[in-house]
Amino acid sequence: MNAIRNILAYPLTVLHYIVFGVILLFFHPVQVIAFNVFGKKAHRKTVIWLNMCLTYSLYFLFSRVKFINKHQIPENVPLIIVANHQGTYDIPPIFWYLRKTYPNFVSKIELGKGIPSVSYNLRKGDSVLINRKDSRQALQTLMAFGDRVEKNKLTAVIFPEGTRSRTGIPKPFRENGLKMMVKKTPSSYIIPLSINNSWKLVRKGAFPLGVGIKVIMEVHEPIKSSSMPFDELMKLTEDTIRDAVMANRPH
């Protein structure tokens, strides 16, 4: 079975990249027209469709995402989705399955240019780009972002590991970014989100991609940010995500 998967991985990866690229190239001008002609609301709808298509493009690899949410996500309040990070393919499903909250991502500044659809959305939407080599810029950007999240009741997505895990085992969470966001959004709720098996899609790098992967994403119980001291909040969030990830790893 593994031998068949390894053989199929090459042509299916090529097919997937063709589809993935067509999606990005198609939605780039669609976004530009929507934003400049019809406004921000229309642009948001195109971004939702974009992420839907990117999520389902995994079917060309015979892979899919199982999204689990057994909790009621608070409405009309600022939200901070905190997740472990296993790869690029984490992003579209988070956006698509949590589209009612319209997630906005804390992304590295390098993604702000050169990628059709993605870079345009990051620049024109409510997401933010931080320079990880410039701590002052990153801090100021997060502070301003936190103010907007609180004022406009937005949803922020942050990956506290800093860089993705290449083995699926969560790296220790860094507290600075989340601490600043919580400080700036006193009425927010933390939404822990665990991601499993996404790393298997890129286990061998960008080529070939993994075939027949079942990515599992699970929303955990929301936590009121002001309900406990930050140290406790950080530990509870990290432990919740780590426990869920490790419980789903093969023994």
Image: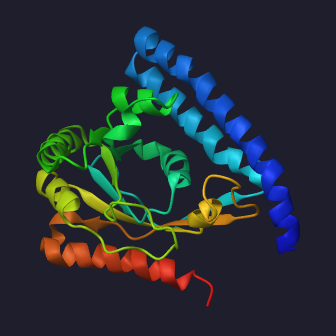
Residue 140: where, in percent of width, then height?
12, 43
Residue 229, quarter of the rendered image: bottom left
Q: Residue at x 88, y 66 (%)?
A: 4
Front one among 48 and 178: 178
Q: Is residue 90 above or below residue 117?
A: below
In the picture, the quarter occupied by the N terminus is bottom right
Residue 165: where, in percent of width, then height?
46, 67
Q: Is residue 228 above or below residue 61?
A: below
- Return the residue found at the far top: 37
In the picture, the quarter occupied by the C terminus is bottom right
Residue 90: where, in percent of width, then height?
52, 55
Front one among 24 and 126: 24
Front one among 88 and 190: 88
In this rendering, position of residue 205 left or right of residue 88: right
Residue 243: where, in percent of width, then height?
43, 82
Q: Is residue 147 visible?
A: yes
Q: Residue at x 50, y 21 (%)?
A: 31
Q: How many marks?
A: 0
Q: Residue at x 83, y 48 (%)?
A: 11
Q: Is residue 143 above or below residue 223?
A: above
Q: Residue at x 47, y 16 (%)?
A: 32
Q: Is residue 67 visible?
A: no
In this rendering, position of residue 131 left or right of residue 207: left
- Return the residue found at the far bottom: 251
